[in-house]
Image (spheres, coloured by chain):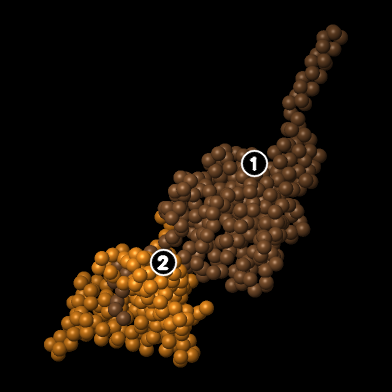
Chain colours: A orange, B brown
Amino acid sequence: MEPAGFPITRVSVIAALASNDPGARRAAADLLARAYWQPIVTTLRARWRLEPEDAEDLTQEFLAEALMKEWLARYDPVRARFRTFLRLCLDRFAANAAQSSRRLKRGGGMHMVPLDDDVMPASPDNPADQLFRQEWVRSVFTLALEALRQDASTQGKQLHVDVFQAYDVDDAGHGRPSYRDLAARYSIPETTITNHLAWARRSFRRHVLHVLRSLAGSEAEFREDVRELLGTDVG
Amino acid sequence: MTALSDSAVNRLRRAIGRPAPPERYQLGEIIGQGGMGEVWQARDVVLDRDVAIKVTAPHLAADEFSARLKREARILARLEHPGIVPVHDVGVLDDGRAWYVMRLVAGTRLDVAARSVAGRGELLRIMERLCDTVAYAHAHHVVHRDLKPGNVMLGPFGEVLVLDWGVARDGAGPDRAAAPSDPDPGSADTVVTHSGTVIGTPGYMSPEQAAGGPADERSDVYGLGAILRDLCAVHDDPMPRALASILRRATAGRPSDRYDSPVALRDDLRRLLDGARVHAHRESIFEATLRIASAYRTPILLILAYLAMRLAILWWRGV
């Protein structure tokens, strides 16, 4: 069964952006923006010390230019992950914007100050990459949760997601609720809590894999992302 | 919707990533990854022993690949042989991924271990045992279909274990008569999965497998031949012509030109080791003389010594 909530199902978002079908292109652009919005905003705020509103404006500008000027069509999966490529594009874009802002400073343009002078190379140890990746994981999970909720709603399994939300997602100040607590809260047996959680986790996992596949530039990137995200590297 | 906190992200990662088998098994570290699954070291706290747990890889669709993993466990459970790792337990994780528990093998893969094996004779004896194991599986209607040095383990006490039966063809299992749409690749004679992937490893799979055709026992003979080829390359000394003939017959392009079973291959290897005539090799009179002379060196020397002594006595008496 196809997970709900994602119009692009079998083709990666990168391939869909080059599609002749305007609907597919629009859906791909939408998914790309939803997946990368927060990583980009956070990176601009942390690395370029932008105010929240300025970071959001620049993110919108970056995504619009990336899509309109077809930068993304230059992506080569052999050379790098799509995520890394996008982060490097963002660095260059932000560096150009910083130059412009210096020129316009007296005219009231936004004030951009990089944390360092050079554009940092892409590397897993690079703090900019780590931050970008961390926010990207959050976005992937957020998209998967949205899809899970839609899925549950169409299947009449809202309670399953509520239990999952309470046990695995919500931050309870005094620790995770026990199965017994949840059984009492929702007036269902503990065994039903176990079953609901199992269903929701399985569905959530399927949606995460689906989002990852949609966002990956290649099958190899997808597999690497899954191994990293699900923490199963050979030790 | 409020943003997920860091701790929520970590909880979610744990919830869908690391396998959570029943409490009886305390999961340790991941010790291997293959195309279909991961193998984790674990502690069986009830029997107080270390075991290995194979789980469907997280990036694979749980339903399809879990069916394959369960099928592999069923095949292993049926094949009780010293050369096949026994299965102890099987189940499904709460995320739908299948798992099974097997003996933890503390050995070395053949491709690594072969370099430290003393001589060619010892390597051929390993091949003999390997043929025995595969022949046993064939006797139970199971064709491995992915024989290669990386799927053979040498144990610390000389055990030769054949691993990874995940793509085996089970000619006697309950899914033998499954519908053609069954995603399980082992349910039919085909060696192409429903997604179009050819089963096997380039360099070790038979030509008929590489072409997407049916694979039978002779396909495993080809795999055994490919392993033999690798083992022969470990030592630099020239290969005996009879061994080269065995190799040629085992890895012949047409299945009908190969040994028809691992037993036939094993028997020829045994003949080679015993100094008998190898069926795959048409030897010249010179080769036959040398072989016989080499095989019966001691009695021939004794007879020659006896004749020399008699001649010496006759000569002495004549004088």
Residue A14's image quarter?
Answer: bottom left
Q: Of helix, strand and loop, which one carries label 1?
A: helix
Residue type at mark 2? Glu
- Residue at (29%, 87%) from the top-left corner? A61
Q: Position of residue B169 (x, y in %)?
A: 66, 61
- Residue at (49%, 55%) from the top-left corner? B53
Residue located beneath label 2 in the image? A190
- Residue at (70%, 38%) from the top-left corner? B273
Q: Position of residue A139 (x, y in %)?
A: 35, 76
Q: Position of residue B99 (x, y in %)?
A: 51, 59
Q: Quick one: quadrant of the N terminus of chain B?
A: bottom left
Chain ID for label 1?
A: B
Return the residue found at the far bottom: A22
- Residue at (44%, 75%) from the top-left corner? A207
Question: Left of B287 or right of it: where is B159?
Answer: left
Judge by depth and name the residue closer to the eye, A164 or A61: A164
Judge by depth and name the residue closer to the eye, A223 or A73: A223
| Label 2 crowd (10 A; few <14 / some 14-19 / many >=20) | some
Residue type at mark 1? Arg
Judge by depth and name the residue closer to the eye, B130 or B257: B130
- Above or below, B195 against B133 in this view is below
Return the residue found at the far left: A106
- Could you tell me if residue A224 is visible in this image? no
Q: Of helix, strand and loop, which one carries label 2?
A: helix
Q: What label does residue B125 carry, if any?
A: 1
- Could you tell me if residue B141 is visible in this image? yes
Question: Left of A172 or right of it: where is B239?
Answer: right
